[in-house]
């Protein structure tokens, strides 16, 4: 999909469909709506007078213009209350416009941007571009038939963003939004691929190809190399599987030489059956999404490189399967780690923290300015925060605050949980240095406590994305399956560190 800013008046821009937002409580057309009303021969005035359309969130009305220039169709979309208009509203508005076009077989459209004094121009254009590109994504590569419900799916090809403001600022921001959302769509595609396709070696190959295409350095360790390095924790998780683990490192050198990097780590567990502590069958297929953190780091790295972010950024994705077999790690086993600490594995289903332990140790050795990991780590976070926010925990309040801010600006929110020392007591082992589980209470926190043992004195935070990485697709820019979360958050955070 091509998204661009066009400095044109809506009335003189000839396009198959133009989407315009209407605030709740609008009783008569003004501003752009008055302009639209002009070439609709008063249809908008009559609509608002009818009371059928009050500008509520779900409101929608479509008109067909007369004449032979200007927009052929006008789609009015309710924006809700003015006080609630923010970047996320705009993201959803642009997504609704794209879906509205799709539903009508229209492949080219324009979207009129209006921040109502609440969203600044650049954020407005970026959010709209993101919403449009995200809405246009779908996962069809494993379907052999093109037609659905007897009709081939329509793919929107171009979205023109219209609106007042500095054309250069708007064009640049729209371009950035498209790059970021394209990165998120890459993450979604990787997430959507089933466990028999998206294996650890598949992820590694995809990243290597991406590195060649967009230009960043990729290093991949196979199991033999991991053994040499001493990555015993990831090898223990992978022990039950025929598919070899991979340790994937991506490097973007956008900063000055020698500048401390920002490190992003993502859990790349390509299928989590639980291991010997086998999960129950219901819903187990969802555990193909257990590499969502890794997918987001990959998508974010692509965007970061394409945006030319002026910082050194390293992405790390430890990737393995977690399966039961005669060679699998067993409850009670004590394993080593890259850091040298020993871990008593009580529950083999608490494997994410094990593969992350080695990755965080590796990341810490790079002496980062800050390190952020994201992982579908605990079912407990779904109980705590549901699907509307990831949990953020870490050892630095400033970093947690940065991530919260990046989360709300990007529409991928996170909310803090405490990481007090007291919780660490739950991980005390009689046999080894640490247990890999801390019992039922505070499952998300004790998981993060475990991770904190492997970051040394690095400024670090962890995002538990088990409730936010995938789902039924409730938002207009989502579909059922992987969401790419937190690709946008990560990119926003990295960018915020450089400006
Ligand atoms: N991958 C799961 C966590 C998960 C749960 C992701 C639900 C997505 C949705 C993780 O490896 C896991 O199994 N965690 C266990 C930890 C427990 C054994 C301490 C959990 O949360 O039940
Ligand atoms: Mn597990
Ligand atoms: Zn897992």
Image (spheres, grey):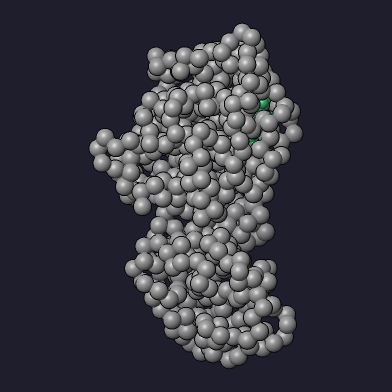
- Residue in front for this viewpoint, 210 or 261: 261
**Residue 111 on image: x %, y %:** 50, 71
495 w.r.t. 127: above or below: above
Q: Residue at x 49, y 61 (%)?
A: 127
Residue at 69%, 78% (x, y): give it: 53
Q: Which one is in front, 7 or 159? A: 7
Residue 99 rendering spot, x and y as whole percentages: 59, 64
The residue at the far left in this view is: 257
User: 191 or 387: which is nearer to us?
Assistant: 387
Q: Quadrant of residue 335?
A: top right
Count of numbered marks: 0
Judge left or right: residue 461 versus residue 431.
left
Residue at x 59%, y 26% (from the top left corner): 421
| Quarter residue 316 falls in | top left
Task: Report whether residue 152 is seen.
Answer: no
Q: Position of residue 433 (x, y in %)?
A: 56, 13
Residue 41 image offset from top left, x and y in percent = 58, 91
Q: Is residue 121 left or right of residue 144?
A: left
At x 47% / y 53%, what residue is drawn?
181
Question: Can you name the residue that lies furthest to the top here?
Answer: 431
Q: Is residue 48 visible?
A: yes
For the N terminus, which image quadrant?
bottom left
Note whether 213 is above or below 136 in the view shown.
above
Q: Is residue 446 above or below residue 137?
A: above
């Amino acid at each position: 999909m091509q998204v661009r800013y066009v400095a044109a008046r809506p009335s003189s821009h000839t396009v198959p469909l133009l989407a315009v937002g209407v605030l709740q409580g609008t009783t008569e057309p003004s501003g752009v709506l008055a302009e639209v009303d002009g070439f609709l021969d008063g249809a908008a005035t009559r609509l608002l007078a009818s009371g059928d359309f009050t500008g509520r969130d779900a409101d929608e009305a479509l008109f067909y213009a007369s004449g032979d220039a200007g927009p052929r169709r006008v789609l009015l979309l309710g924006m809700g209350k003015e006080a609630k208009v923010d970047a996320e509203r705009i993201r959803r508005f642009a997504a609704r416009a794209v879906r509205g076009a799709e539903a009508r077989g229209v492949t080219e459209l324009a979207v009129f941007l209006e921040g109502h004094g609440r969203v600044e121009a650049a954020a407005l254009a970026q959010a709209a571009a993101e919403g449009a590109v995200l809405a246009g994504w779908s996962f069809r590569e494993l379907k052999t038939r093109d037609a659905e419900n007897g009709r081939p799916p329509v793919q929107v090809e171009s979205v023109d963003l219209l609106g007042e403001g500095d054309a250069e600022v708007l064009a640049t921001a729209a371009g950035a939004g498209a790059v970021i959302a394209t990165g998120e769509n890459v993450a979604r595609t990787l997430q959507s691929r089933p466990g028999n396709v998206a294996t650890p070696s598949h992820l590694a190959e995809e990243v290597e190809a991406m590195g060649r295409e967009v230009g960043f350095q990729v290093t991949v360790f196979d199991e033999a190399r991991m053994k040499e390095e001493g990555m015993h924790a990831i090898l223990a998780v992978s022990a039950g599987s025929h598919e070899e683990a991979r340790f994937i490192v991506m490097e973007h050198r956008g900063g000055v030489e020698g500048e401390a990097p920002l490190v992003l780590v993502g859990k790349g567990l390509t299928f989590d059956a639980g291991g010997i502590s086998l999960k129950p069958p219901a819903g187990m297929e969802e555990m193909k999404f257990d590499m969502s953190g890794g997918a987001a780091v990959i998508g974010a790295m692509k965007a970061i490189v394409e945006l030319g972010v002026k910082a050194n950024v390293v992405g790390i994705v430890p990737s393995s399967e977690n399966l039961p077999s005669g060679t699998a790690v067993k409850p009670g086993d004590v394993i080593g780690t890259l850091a040298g600490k020993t871990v008593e594995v009580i529950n083999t289903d608490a494997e994410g923290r094990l593969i992350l332990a080695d990755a965080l140790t590796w990341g810490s050795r790079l002496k980062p300015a800050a390190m952020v990991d994201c992982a579908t780590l605990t079912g407990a976070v779904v109980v705590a925060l549901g699907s509307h926010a990831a949990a953020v925990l870490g050892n630095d309040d400033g970093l947690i605050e940065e991530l919260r801010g990046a989360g709300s600006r990007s529409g991928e929110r996170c909310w803090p949980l405490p990481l007090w020392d007291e919780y660490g007591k739950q991980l005390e082992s009689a046999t080894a240095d640490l247990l890999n589980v801390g019992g039922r209470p505070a499952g998300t926190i004790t998981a993060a406590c475990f991770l904190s043992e492997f970051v040394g004195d690095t400024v670090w935070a962890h995002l538990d994305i088990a409730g936010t990485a995938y789902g039924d697709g409730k938002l207009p820019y989502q579909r059922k399956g992987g969401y790419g979360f937190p690709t946008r958050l990560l990119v926003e955070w990295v960018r915020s560190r450089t400006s």
